[in-house]
Amino acid sequence: MRVILNRMGRLAWLAASGPGAWKGLWLFALILALEFVGVWLSVQMINWSRAFYDALEQLDAAEALRQIGVFGLIVAVLSASTLSGAWLRKWLQIGWRQRLTDRALTLWLDGGAYWHLRPGLSPQPVENPDQRIAQDCAQFISYLLEFTLDLITRVVSLITYLAVLWSLSNFPLSLGFLGIEAEIPRYMVWASFLYVFGSSLITHWLGRPIKRLAYDQERYEADFRHALVQVRDGADQIAQAGGEGAERRRLDRRFDSLRANWKRLIGQEFILGLFVTPYYRTVLRIPTFLALPAYFGGAVTLGGLMQLASAFSNVTTTLSWFIFDYSKLARFVAVSERLEGLFSAASAPQPAPDVPRALEVVSGGDGLLRLRDLHLYTPSGQALDPVPDTTIRPGQRVWIHGASGRGKTTLLSALRGVWPYGTGRVSLPEAPILALPQQPLAFAEGLLPTLTYPHDPASFDSALLEGILRKVGLERRIGGPDGPEALQGLSMGERQRLALARVLLLKPAWVLLDEATSALDPASEARLLALLRNDLPRSTILCVAHRVPAGLDHDSELWIGPDDERMTA
């Protein structure tokens, strides 16, 4: 329990602290004050029930009508405070969700956790981080406000209602068994605690498995959604391969896992409901039954009976918070566990424990790139081929080649400073570096945001952007509406053209090409690499390619792999 509370406390602090946090705390205090108004009005309703039913018992029509008016006034004020509190709670909810989401995005992006915690790169990858940031943050804040406000309000309510119940149950319950007489003073108070305590134990025993099942359900839902996104993103490859049947089988397997866990979850919730539902239906009537001895003994009037039953009901329903909300509490714990896992992993991404991490990456002031004693490893600890000691000067064009799986792409990742597994020293120039992968990303915002990424398209002259698109052979994409629809139907070759256009626009001092022209025909590849060479004469270009990069006119080579393979390559 302490671990769970500490976890929730840390996440709550992230959501409620920071610059301007006092506004949220004042709003929380205002919402809490409105909740206390509701408690006070509930006490007035308890007192009203006695006055109203006493009027009925005495056949006092005038007093009964007056109490109906009082009832309407109480309901009006209670409705106003409840609606105001709900409206303010939603404002606070979006504010705290924004803070928590900001913290999650900062950890996820600024520290490179989005890269390091991918499957295959970390022994403990974070599955479905998109769902944890988008959905779990929202659910956590919703549950946090609901349960925090409820808990504080119910503690105050319990004290208030207990005081009322204590003052009303000023008569004992007389019991006799085998000639032994006993009296239980203020038995209605003790009965409320025993009734709820026993019920809470049964609820926890029946509902304990729900937390794990709720956690797993969130994971299966995210896995199924991710599989659907993969179908959308790989539509061309699936269609060309006739893979509809395979994709349907894959989706069916994901959904079967989702459905199987759902059946277990609702089965456990049904078992819990077998107890909670009758409890909920009877909790408002049991007080009346327990107070009947006092009524039949003449200790209370009909109005007093209804007032006593109302006070007892308020005490028991307040104490029954754990019982009524057990399933939601289990989901709250599951969401907290998923979010804590994200924050913990993103705060300190843990690589494989037995893989060397002595790679020294430094910035040099002489503009040279130097590789010394460089040995790179996979996350599983497999050693890649050693990288020859190399010095690359500004303006050079270097062809990096070698057999597949020798570590060429890993070398480029190390040059960008994001690959942690290795030994040796990399001295990087203090100059802008732009890397293009084999499968460039087309950003959902549109064609121009992809071209100018990470800059705003509005900061560039439109004629300049159009001219560059024409240079790389994308003139047919000019003139139409920009947005997600502008990226529809882009082939891999067109995506690579767009990525090369980005290099021409941003003019980085160092360019890393990782098979960035593999989808182009030889003539187009030669023309575009020659365009890079001519338009960026002072830029250093490192090009990973299996064949000689036509048009680059490279002036040096870097072979990665055994020399005997090079002889046959």
Image (cartoon, rainbow, N blue to C red):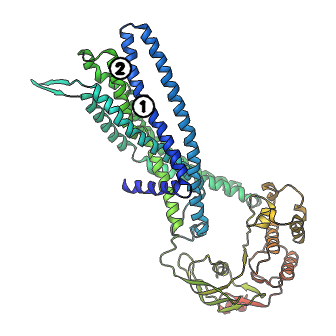
| Residue at (59% x, 63% y) in the render | 106
**Label located before the other in sequence (2 or 1):** 1
Mark 1: which amino acid?
Answer: Trp
Mark number for residue 306? Answer: 2
Tell which of 120 and 172 is nearer to you.
172
Mark 2: which amino acid?
Answer: Met
State the residue position of label 1: 40
Residue 447 drawn at (x, y percent): 81, 61
SS for dot 1: helix
Q: Is residue 191 visible?
A: yes
Q: Are marks 2 and 1 in contact (CB under 8 Å)?
A: no
Tell which of 15 and 179 is nearer to you.
15
Q: Is residue 207 left or right of residue 432?
A: left
From the viewer's perspective, is residue 498 above or below residue 486?
below
Residue 92 drawn at (x, y percent): 56, 46
Tell which of 552 and 560 is nearer to you.
552
Residue 391 drawn at (x, y percent): 69, 92
From the viewer's perspective, is residue 318 above or below residue 439?
above
Crowdedness near tag 1: few (<14), some (14–19) or many (≥20) residues, C-alpha within 10 Å: some
Q: CA distance from mark 2 to mark 1?
A: 18 Å
Residue 327 drawn at (x, y percent): 45, 42
Mark number for residue 16? Answer: none
Q: Is residue 268 visible?
A: no
| Picture quarter with the C terminus | bottom right
SS for dot 2: helix
Crowdedness near tag 2: few (<14), some (14–19) or many (≥20) residues, C-alpha within 10 Å: many
From the viewer's perspective, is residue 227 above or below residue 514?
above
State the image quarter where residue 151 is shown: top left
| Residue at (47% x, 20% y) in the render | 71
| Residue at (78% x, 67% y) in the render | 452
Q: Is residue 138 left or right of residue 461?
A: left
